[in-house]
Image (spheres, rainbow, N blue to C red):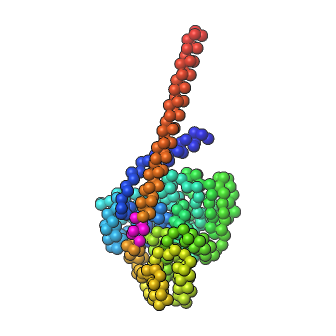
Amino acid sequence: MRKVIATLFLLMALAVLSFKPAFAQDVKEVIIATNVSYADFAVASVAANKIGAALFFVSENEIPAETLEAINSINPEKIYIIGGPAVVSKNVEDELSKNYEVVRIWGMTRYGTASEVAKYFWSEGSEEAILIWDKPDSREVDLNVSLMIVKAAEEAASEEIPLLLIPKNHLSNEVEDALKTLNVSKVKVYGNVGSKVFDELNALGISYESIPGDPSQVREKIGERIRERFKYGARPIIVAAVANWQEGLAGRASPHGVSILVFSESEINETVEKVNETIQTRNVSKVLVTGKPELARKIYDALIDAGINESVPVYLVSGKHYRVAKKIFEKVREKIKEIRERYQERLKKIREKLAKLREKIKERCEYWFSRANETIETLNTSLAEAR
């Protein structure tokens, strides 16, 4: 057991110490994900929120002009592609590689990709994680399920812990491996999952909190939890006029953003009341209205008519999800810089701790190596005398 722990610490040290910190004043990393898989974009958004990276959409076989313009304006040191060649083609990777360092992170399934993202961006480990069930890979999207995943990504980003997608009735091998690698000891399990999930968590020695419900109920429960965390810092509200999952997910380009999803014009008055109540009781930095242009415009006008803009800035950022992600980045760039700087500072402290740990391990190894040599010399002397 001691050997396992020592090995784990050494691996952590190698993973983190190999990272060269850059205490820059601007965004230096970009994460891109496909517009054909909400799962990949959701887990990408959690990672982007942790490290202070800009987050953009790409299509399967090309980079939209809006996204490429945003990337070039950043001139990043590194671009992460989340998802395999089936959803972000090799052509896209090759085009980006002409000018930038590109790292692709992916698994054979959405469960595998989420697990690989968690292991890569939480190489130092994570005591907690969020598990939420998702349907297997498919080009057909269940809007309710996809928006449940969006909300789970929002909570994971808020708590800066990994988001792991699981099949509904068991833990996949990739998920089990991620839980072990990250040394997770506690998880929140969202949705109506099979009992085998909890049996397997028990077998791994991981405690859990179960939050059951259908996708819409889970969204509401997560929303309540996120609203409670508002008191700990200023956050933007993202009001998304939703007709598809891309519009729901585009708001994830805003770090620590709290989303309110609006599906029809009949919900506008209730939405205005919810925004107003939140502003009065929580620390809101700004309101961004995104999504389906016609509905988004009506929501924006209603917020202005209600005088919301007299308390906090209100911006209309509607249109195609590519454009929305770019425009949101422009509105929250300063916030992303702050997140990156805090992340770099945490990395520096982790590096210092691991460097000290490495020295202690080195000293212990040298001590036992010396003792082993002494023992060998003693044995050799005894053997010589015996002859």
Q: Is residue 302 visible in the rendered structure shown here?
A: no
Image: magenta residue range: 332-337
Q: Position of residue 310 (x, y in %)?
A: 45, 84
Image coordinates of residue 250 in percent, x first then y, are 45, 74
Residue at x 55% of width, y 41% of height: 6
Q: Quadrant of the C terminus?
A: top right
Q: Quadrant of residue 28?
A: bottom left
> In this orientation, does residue 180 appear?
yes
Left or right: 190 with respect to 254? right
Asked whether residue 336 is drawn in magenta, I would say yes
Q: Residue at x 58, y 55 (%)?
A: 127
Quadrant where the N terminus sits is top right
Q: Position of residue 196 (x, y in %)?
A: 68, 60
* Residue 179 included in the magenta stretch of the image: no
Of helix, strand and loop, which mostly describes the magenta segment? helix
In this rendered view, identify the residue nearer to me: 221 or 313. 313
Q: Is residue 113 above or below residue 154?
A: above
